[in-house]
Amino acid sequence: MTKRRTKMPDEGVALRAIGADSLLARLDGPAGLKALSSAELDQIAEQLRTAIIATTAVTGGHLGPSLGVVELTVALHRVMNSPVDRIVFDTGHQAYPHKLLTGRLARFGTLRQLGGIGGFPRRTESPHDVFDGGHAGTGISIGQGLALARDVRGSNEKVAVIVGDAALMSGLSLEALNDIGDRGTPLLIVLNDNEMSISPTVGAISTYLSKVKLSGRWRESKGWYDRTISRVPLVGTQLAAWSKSLRHSVVSLVQEPGRLFEDLGITYVGVLDGHNRAQLEEAFAKAFTMNGPVIVHVRTQKGRGYRPAEVDPITFHGAALPKVPVGATDSYGKAGADPIATPAKVPNYTAFFASEVIAAAATDRRIVAITAGMPTGTGLDKFATAYPDRFYDVGIAEQHAIAAATGIAMGGGRPVVAIYSTFLQRAWDQIVHDVCQNDQPVLIGVDRAGLVGEDGTSHQGMFMLTAQRQIPRLLVASPKDEQQLRSLVRTALAQDHPFALHYPRDSVVGVPEVAPTILPVGVSEVLEEGTQIAILAFGPIIQRAAPI
């Protein structure tokens, strides 16, 4: 079993890394940023990165995403007045700079530890944390709700949402954008694009056009022109419509990524350099003067300032605990020893699940693998390498993943869907209505089932087991060790019914390897006979119950 940290780590590691007399250590909350010079703000950015690197080297955590939004976070706090103004972090794994700027530097070394600083925004931790997040795609809806409540009250606080390019494509985000554009809710959405997947246009023309669209003169002249041309006798209405269409086409040619947002009724600005603080401040400040929703599209670099994370953003998206505690880095790892040692690879249940699915797929071409934006985390990246034509990553779209798997099964395939238990909650209706009501042979790999420790309240995986037990036609199982997991994969693939296989994030037990077999369904296994007491156990916890 994985050993859990029982002793609170050194809470002052971040403070020592930057020095007690540093600008960041002496900063009087985010309001103090407004009085700093450009050179001093550069120091703040450097110290934020040093504190984050030094801390995650000891505690683990989402290193890459947080390093990428340092300038963005500083710029937002410079033009806003938190906590009166509201900053919503979609997902929340990129909130470390925000936490450090809002009074949590001294205890930042307790990041993701019991009783310490949470890995995601937490309202009980600070009034600057607006929303207890953790899952992707919820931020825009939360932000709109805050803005609507503001408008009902008749107050004037600013609301900003930071959302990543992957989370933006989730169904919930698109639903929110559709409603925001229709209602014209005044709201700033910062699209943090760190994957370069929707940013083909960066350059002087795009930057210039963004400034023009945010200017008051552009808005006033555009409105005056439309009103004037529409008054032309006989053809005014048609001319106005043609003029708007032409204007939209010209803008779209230069800012193609923003066409969707403009069509929805949301002003699009971008693509801006997400590490140019002054440019970001100007864009954010002007966006807040507009009477409607604005998306500011910025391009950032995951892991910015820490060379290993810049080169390998996937590995350093969430850095694991190192083999030994180490101190802060010098020059962000560009020279000298690497502060974040790569831990020795210990086989876990995820790896055994994925390898057995790959082995089964070698002799059964009906088997396809599906994941919802987590190929590496679920181990299915290796399936993608082995069988690229039978692998589907649908992005952050758990509902679609399960529904599509149902269709594949109905078409004669044997789909295997691997999703973290905490994210599978989103696909509840598809499990009940699509898979189980239609009694389709879909293998649902429920990864990170049970307790997951350091990831906090938003990522615990214990709810899905209780929920799934009540669904008709669904077989639910959990292995006592890695070898039984292999057999359960084969058992699930041999069924003509839905099968949910729960397994934890833990390291495996290390039992001797045996060939997988198809197990009898609905039959318990007696591990030891006795006469005084009966102990019933399910899943890997059997390893703790067996010695009793």
Image (spheres, grey):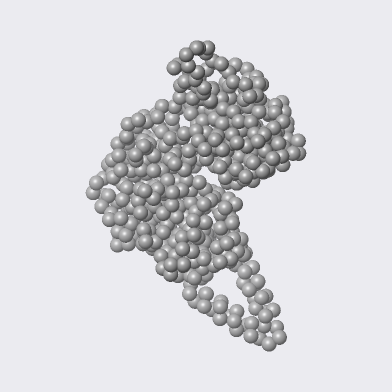
Q: Residue furthest front?
A: 532
Q: Residue at x 56, y 66 (%)?
A: 183
Q: Quadrant of the N terminus?
A: top left
- Residue at horizontal 50%, vertical 35%? 462
Residue 44 visible to the viewer: yes
Q: How many marks?
A: 0
317, 348: nearer the viewer: 348
Q: Assign the C terminus to one quadrant of the image.
A: top left
> Which residue is at a point 47% across and 46% down the rendered structure image?
134
| 350, above or below 260, in the image | above
x then y, percent, for residue 162: 47, 55
- Visible residue check, residue 312: no
Residue at horizontal 35 percent and vertical 51 percent from the top: 126
Residue 166 place in picture, x, y as percent: 55, 49
**Which residue is the extreme one toward the bottom?**
233
Residue, far left: 21
Residue nearest the observer in this picture, 499 or 239: 499
Q: Is residue 440 left or right of residue 119?
A: right
- Quarter of the image where one finds residue 19: top left
Q: Position of residue 393 (x, y in %)?
A: 62, 42
Left or right relative to 363: residue 281: left
Residue 445 picture location, percent across and down:
60, 33
Q: Does residue 300 sit above or below 542 in this rendering?
A: below
